[in-house]
Amino acid sequence: MIREIIDINPKTWLKPFQKTSIFYLLKMGLFYHGLGVILMYAGSFFATNIISDYEIPQFPVSITLAVSSGLLEESIFFGMPYYMTGNPLILLGSGIIWSASHLFSSSVFSVEALAYGGFLLTIPHIFFSIRTWISKKGWFAIVFHSAWNFSFLILYCMLGLRQCSIVNDMYDVINLIMAISAGVIVYLAYQNKKRYLNRFLYLIPVGIIFVSSAILFSDYVL
């Protein structure tokens, strides 16, 4: 119990966890995400009562998108910076960018339409991911992130708050392809820490991400 007390102390939130067993990491994940849920509902409550005409953004999220986003986001915003620098402050910076992007998840850039709740939900997750990656358990951060997204979506679907589907559109498929490619890059970086790998191996997943991003951007512009 002493380890848990130390790890929930904000002074340690940029340091590795005291223990790295699966059960211990699960407890820490639930702590951080429980805190995130509290912040989310508090933020949504204040937003709806302070901002006139504010409505909590609603947008379609498929099971494929929810699960693949865990892999994609962890790989790009935490895994890659970790293997490139190993510096928790760099991960904090990339995590802040990731968290802030959730404000605009509805793609509507208006004060009355920003996803304040979603943004606040992600803040504690930043520290959980940082600590999990620097504890050399990045795979757990990916699995937990995807499982959390899946569980949250299924719960909302069961409560009738969202419509559940396996795949909504081509965006979900492209997101999955990008997620797998990003995961491959992180895996290659992990293997490169143990033995030298030919850097040309990175070209394939990087190229796939570049092409996929171009397709998404062209569809958005058009």
Image: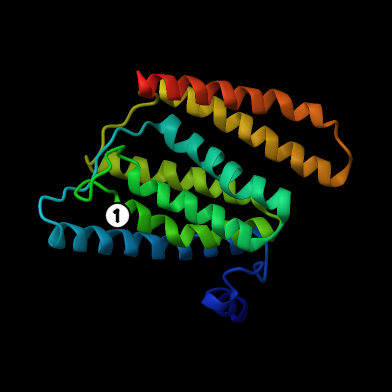
Location of the C terminus by quadrant is top left
Q: Which residue is mark 1?
A: 116
Instruction: Write the residue at 54% across / 64% down.
Output: 28
- Vertical arrangement, residue 73 with respect to residue 34, above or below: above
- Vertical arrangement, residue 158 with respect to residue 28, above or below: above
Would you call the spot at circle 1 few (<14 residues within 10 Å), some (14-19), or many (20 or more)?
A: many
- Vertical arrangement, residue 216 with respect to residue 69, above or below: above
Location of the N terminus by quadrant is bottom right
- Counting from the top left corner in percent of width and height, residue 130 is at 60, 59
The answer to which quarter of the image holds residue 20 is bottom right
Residue 101 in view (yes/no): yes
Residue type (three-letter) at the residue carrying disc 1: Tyr
- Counting from the top left corner in percent of width and height, residue 170 is at 41, 19
Instruction: Write the residue at 34% across / 51% down.
Output: 118
Numbered-mark total: 1
- Counting from the top left corner in percent of width and height, residue 127 is at 53, 62
- Left or right? Give the position of 177 relative to 53: right
**Viewer-closest of 131 and 196:** 196
